[in-house]
Amino acid sequence: SSTCEDLNTFWGFWDCWVAPGDDVILPCHLEPKYNVEGLTVEWSKPDLQPDPADRLSRVEYVHFYRDGREVLDLKIRSYLRRTELFTDDLKDGNISLRIKNVTLADQGSYRCFIPKLRGPVTASTIQLVVGESDCSSCLSVPSSGGRLYLSALAGGLFLFLFLFVVVGVCLHKRNPGKQNTFFNKSC
């Protein structure tokens, strides 16, 4: 069992596209797995700050989880009944947030943060873009375990680059005196 000190890293996306009216999952989880059920989890929009002219104003949250439940009186009104954590997966470090019925006003930066977490990274920021897109860059969290990994994509890219370099080196070593037209062609 891991401790909360200097071991955890946040994993999340930086950009996510979604169409208005759709539901979206803003993925964020800890590696290695760490039970955050007893900790405070904050989801906020860092661009929204309290009014400095109003001394009684406070930071409001997209979602605020403390003592095993959502705290509604700290929530931004437009997100009431539209957000949820995957509470069954908090024990595995999954702090992904589902936003239902996304609107154009939901566009912007989102920050997932655990105040009492110690380590090199204590927060992750995700940019939500609301609108129609011709690409499918918005990924959802799989239902099995609620965690999202990009390792397959990164591994495939690494393998492709590695093979490209190996083939290039082999071609160059095979014909050291010859100019290789493969590398000299311009695009």
Image: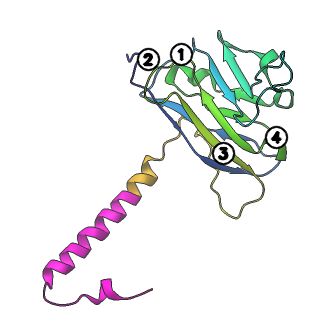
> Mark 3 vs mark 1: which is more N-terminal?
1
> Which residue is located at x 76 percent, y 33 percent?
48
| Numbered disc in front, either 4 or 3 | 3
Q: Residue under label 3, please give it.
A: 127
Label 2 packing within 10 angstroms: few (<14), some (14-19), many (20+): some
Confirm or deny contact between disc 4 and disc 1 (CB under 8 A).
no
Q: Is the residue 145 above or below the residue 142 in the image?
A: above
Residues under numbered marks 2 and 3 in contact, where contact means CB atoms less than 8 Å apart? no
Chain part drawn in magenta: 157-186
CA gap between label 3 and label 1 equals 24 Å
Residue 54 lies in the magenta-colored region: no
* Label 4 vs 1, first from the N-terminus: 4
Who's the residue at 59% across and 40% down the image? 141
Q: Given contact means CB atoms under 8 Å apart, are the residues at marks 3 and 1 in contact?
A: no
Mark with earlier residue (2, 4): 2
Name the residue that disc number 2 marks: 4
Query: Are there few (<14), some (14-19), or many (20+) residues within 10 Å of tag 4?
Result: some
Q: Amino acid at mark 4?
A: Asn
| Relative horizontal placement of residue 152, taking residue 115 as reference (left or right) | left
State the residue at coordinates (85%, 24%). Answer: 53
Q: Position of residue 47 (x, y in %)?
A: 73, 37
Which image quadrant: the N terminus? Answer: top left
Q: Secondary structure at mark 4?
A: loop
* Lower position in the chain sequence, tag 2 or tag 3: 2
